[in-house]
Image (cartoon, helix red, strand yellow):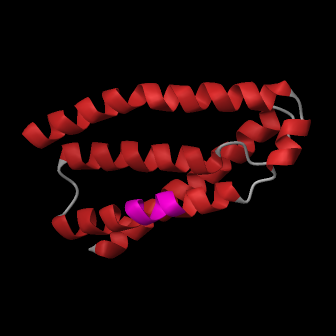
Amino acid sequence: MKIYGVALLAFCYLLGKYLGGLLGSLLGINADVGGVGFAMLLLILLNAWLKRKGFLEEETEKGLLFWSSMYIPVVVAMASVLNVKGALSGGWAAVVIGVVVTFGSFALVPVISKVGLKNKKA
């Protein structure tokens, strides 16, 4: 059922927001640090694990695929309204971390592509 895809997405989102808030409090910041990113990572990992174990029905996979494809544009829209000026005035740490994460993401594209190719062959 497609509703299970929505339930899985909601679970990942809530757990990701919790982990982001926990990380923020551990760092001494009164904010969510990477909650949406944690949620996306959880969704990818949980989806792959459930698929590998054979727990996903075709309708559930369709629901997950639909909401996963909707999730990324929503995250981009949310990120576009962040206070970039505030981040830059916070010091060079924000700029350096942003650059490192961006290039790290670029470096992971070939790895993720290979994983996708292996899953298609299987």
Q: Main secondary structure of the magenta part?
A: helix
Asked if residue 30 is positioned above or below residue 13 in the image, the reply reads above
**Residue 110 appears in the rendering:** yes
Q: Residue at x 25, y 67 (%)?
A: 62
Say above or below: 94 vs 48: above
| Picture coordinates of residue 2, whole percent (x, y) | 30, 73
Q: Is residue 90 left or right of residue 57?
A: right
Apparent side of residue 121 relative to residue 80 in the rendered image (left or right): left
Q: Residue at x 65, y 60 (%)?
A: 78
Quadrant assignment, res 9? bottom left
Residue closest to the eye, 73 or 49: 73
| Residue 98 falls in image quadrant | top right
Q: Quarter holding the N terminus? A: bottom left
- Looking at the image, residue 63 lies above or below residue 50: below
Left or right: where 22 falls relative to 50 = right
Does residue 122 appear anywhere in the picture?
Answer: no
The quarter of the image holding the C terminus is top left
Give the residues drawn in magenta, as a range: 68-73
Q: Position of residue 10 (x, y in %)?
A: 50, 64
Q: Residue at x 38, y 32 (%)?
A: 109
Task: Identify which residue is drawn at 56% across, 44% down.
Answer: 38
- How far across and how far down the image is residue 53, in percent? 20, 45
**105 magenta-colored:** no
Across the whole image, how many numbered discs are drawn on residues? 0
Q: Whole-percent x and y of residue 35?
A: 64, 48
Whether residue 73 sits left or right of residue 78 in the image: it is: left
For this orientation, the residue located farthest to the right is: 89
Specify the farthest residue to the left: 121
